Amino acid sequence: MTTVRHRSFWHHLWAVARRPFVLDLRALALLRMGTAAVVLLDLAIRSTDLEAHYANMGVLPFSAVLEHAWTPYQFSLHGASGLWQVQAVLFGLAAVVAGALLLGYHTRLATLASWVLLVSLQNRNPLIGQGGDDLLRMLLFWGFFLPWGRVWSWDAGGRPLPARLDYASAATVAYVVQLALLYWCTALLKRGPEWQHDGTALYYALSLDQLLLPGGRLLYPHPDLLRFLTFATWYTELLLPLALFIPFGVRWWRLLVLGVLFGFHLGISLTLFVGIFFVINMVSVLGLLPPVALDWLAPRLAPHAARARRWQARLPPLQVPWRLRFERTSPAVPGRVALLRQVREALVVSLLFYICWWSFDDVSGKPGRWMSEPTRWFGYLFRIDQHWGMFAPAVFKDDGWYVLEGTTTTGRVLDLNRGGAPVTYAKPAAIVSLFKNDRWRKYSENYLFVSNAWMRPYYCNYLLRIWQQNPAHPPLRHLAVVYMKEVSQPNYQVLPATREILCDCAPPESAPTPTPAP
């Protein structure tokens, strides 16, 4: 009797402990579709700069990436050719497999292919990456181990939903812990006094005209509100993830987390120019949707699902040479299936341990304190390396704007950043409008760092070349990449901007090799 009670106690304890990691298969399906949609959106935005960002005639030849921006363990299919046409083919292939993932067609294979192509793309030009790229990459990585194609997918074949929609495994633990690590590390890396003591972090963030959007302009004149929002942001990132691990009232805690994070990232999107960063973060939590929310949502999606099934029925059956499965649905030897499941669970636990190890070392304040460099090769190879230092440890203070100062052969001085208008050093009304998209804004931010001086001539030469290609443009004999530096000051003080020449270049026939400014 004592043994029975003992077993019952541990069984009950285990049932309680696993509650935070039980996910609804329908939520995982929405996570899959949202992730695939974001991949397609990312590809669409990136595709507008095929030559500029991914070809050897652009701002970053692959040889420079290999020399300055890579570890020996990285790979990139996009680096196989420097032609933009080859990049276009790879982009098209990535869009096809992302579309298959969206539909849930051969889901495991589509997930793996999407992850490989995304890693390849991000590795090709790391100087335009941002935190959302790390998260998108990790969603695909963990998605490979999740059954996010079990329902609401082409693979499901219109079959009725399974009798049980709840699912828990090492992969669901990894997914939940990954989300928590993102916000915990973001908070712990914000060690500057402006976050934890002065409450001025958002003031400095909204002082960056390269990021400021109209919503931010409305908040900026109110220091007391900004101080409150600074502390609210830091404590939200630090404490909110704890709610994901409370084993009682799980659905209500998840709804709280979802509501707060949706509002949090929507607020960021209205105040700061962060590209699709906020979209990726909002999509990343869809897997947490509890059954109560999905039961409300499912009837509203049913008509669309019925139309999709009718459309699918009209199509001829599609076959691929092979299919990748970690979840076997056909009859198999029970012992072998159990062994494979145990191997998979052990693998996921090992990967999660490695990522936690990496993250703890990252927030330790002394890189290499807990994780030595020889152990990092695995993270670099599979791109499970991650750093969540958004506005950390303090907010960047070097603000300003670019003037692409071109001198024509007749002596006129034009600003290429404003379509060839006469040069002026006056501050633009909206600096953020000078950037085509957030990838260019991130590139321009990296362009400022002295440690990245090696990249400056490539950009200067690229600008000069594309300007000269247009016969309507007056020929240039010299181009200077000028940065009007305006360092953010406390208490709404504004200092005059200083003119800094980051790089000079000229057409090959009229000048020596361009050199970056120190």
Image (tube, rainbow, N blue to C red):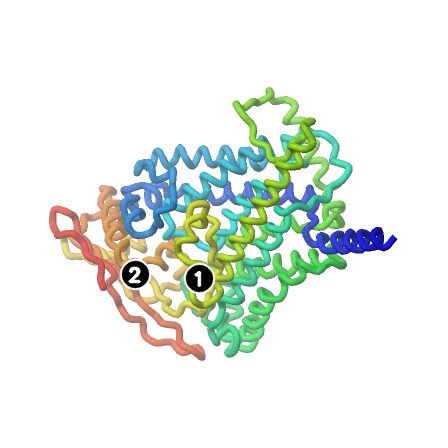
Q: Nearer the viewer, mark 2 or mark 1?
A: 2
Q: Does 8 sit above or below residue 39? A: below
Task: Answer with mark 2 or mark 1, whichever residue precedes in sequence.
Answer: 1
Secondary element at image label 1: loop
Tell me which amino acid carries mark 1.
Leu
In which quadrant will I find the C terminus? bottom left
Residue designated by label 1:
211
Q: Residue at x 61, y 42 (%)?
A: 146
| Furthest residue toward top | 316
Q: Find residue 231 and report its horizontal and vertical position in percent.
A: 57, 72
The residue carrying pointer 2 sits among few (fewer than 14), some (14 to 19) or many (20 or more) residues within 10 Å by Cα, namely: few
Q: Nearer the viewer, residue 460 or 64?
A: 64
| Furthest residue toward right | 1
Residue designated by label 2:
451
Q: Residue at x 53, y 66 (%)?
A: 187
Q: Find residue 216 and report its horizontal and vertical position in percent.
A: 51, 66
Is the C-beta separation of discs 2 and 1 under 8 Å? Answer: no
Q: Is residue 64 left or right of residue 222?
A: left
Q: Does 74 sit above or below residue 83? A: below
Secondary element at image label 2: helix
Q: Does 342 sit above or below residue 335? A: below
Q: Is residue 321 left or right of residue 313?
A: left
Q: Is residue 426 left or right of residue 305?
A: left
Q: Which quadrant of the figure has residue 48?
A: top left
Q: Nearer the viewer, residue 456 or 366?
A: 366
Residue 62 shows in the view: yes
Q: Which quadrant of the figure has residue 26?
A: top right
Q: Find residue 94 and report its horizontal and vertical position in percent.
A: 46, 36
Tell me which amino acid carries mark 2.
Ser
Q: CA distance from mark 2 to mark 1?
A: 22 Å
Q: Find residue 416 and report its horizontal and vertical position in percent.
A: 28, 54
Q: Which quadrant of the figure has residue 93?
A: top left
